[in-house]
Image (cartoon, rainbow, N blue to C red):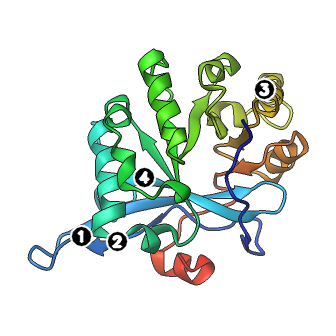
Amino acid sequence: MSASLPTPSQPAGNSPAHPSPTLAPATATAETEEQVFIARQPIFETKTQRLYGYELLFRSSEENKYTATDGRLASSQTINRAVHSIGLDAVVGEKKAFINITRDLLLEEIYCLLPAQQTVVEILEDLILDEEVVQACAKLRAAGYGLALDDITDADRCVPLAPFVDIIKLDKSFTDDLPHGERGLRLAEAVGHLASDMGANTEAEGIETAEQAACLAALGWEFGQGFYFSRPLSAEAAEAEYGA
């Protein structure tokens, strides 16, 4: 199936190191005045460096570090905060929201709390792609949600979800090998060809240099995220840069 995710229209900026894995804080309730946080990792088009969306990540404080040990709790809290405490519009504006999800939460369909046309659900690398998971992903796509495979280290992992995947994400350890390492180039080329056959898009994680970004763009990889595009900055700076 052909990927149906829309093309972004907002430029990333003029500097080669664009912002930002930023925190989006808000007050949870008037009664408790509890501060809640979501980290935002921007995702860009590799060729145009236009902002496409944000991967939303659980954070427990302003330190902007992942400290959770329970992946299920972290994913559910991120979704809850994006929907109820802060509001998705305040977090990503009109851009795509990428949400990591565990097996239990996928089967429980917690993603239904989020708007389908704006949400891309990421299947984590440790999630076994058995028949129950494949059927849950088919149901997710039928409901209009985007589906991404996170941290791919083996092209064969994409095969069970081939009819449903919109975006395949290359693991950072392979991006680190680019632009000259044979290991990274071999997997990037293999996944790129497979994604083309599947009608899916590709995204590389952990892009840290202009050479890596140029290599991936030349290989036809559509999206990327990493410190080359985005260095940490305050939420206020992100608002001024992107409007979200």
Q: Amino acid at mark 3?
A: Leu
Badge 3 or badge 4: first in the primary sequence: 4
Tell me the SS state at disc 3.
helix
Report how far apart the C-alphas of labels 2 and 1 lie in the structure.
Answer: 6 Å
Residue 201, percent from left and from top: 73, 42
Badge 4 or badge 1: first in the primary sequence: 1
Q: Nearer the viewer, mark 3 or mark 2?
A: 3
Residue annotated with mark 3: 194
**Residue 230, quarter of picture:** bottom right
Who's the residue at 63% across and 35% down the image? 165
The label on residue 35 is 1
Tell me the SS state at disc 1.
strand
Q: Amino acid at mark 2?
A: Pro
Residue lying at the far front in this picture: please name it.
142
Badge 1 or badge 3: first in the primary sequence: 1
**Few, some or many C-alpha atoms within 10 Å of disc 4 (few <14, some 14-19, many ≥20)?**
many
2 and 1 marks in contact (CB < 8 Å)? yes
Residue 133, percent from left and from top: 44, 24
Who's the residue at 77% across and 22% down the image? 183
**Few, some or many C-alpha atoms within 10 Å of disc 1 (few <14, some 14-19, many ≥20)?**
some
Residue annotated with mark 2: 25
Residue annotated with mark 4: 57
**Few, some or many C-alpha atoms within 10 Å of disc 2 (few <14, some 14-19, many ≥20)?**
many
Badge 2 or badge 4: first in the primary sequence: 2
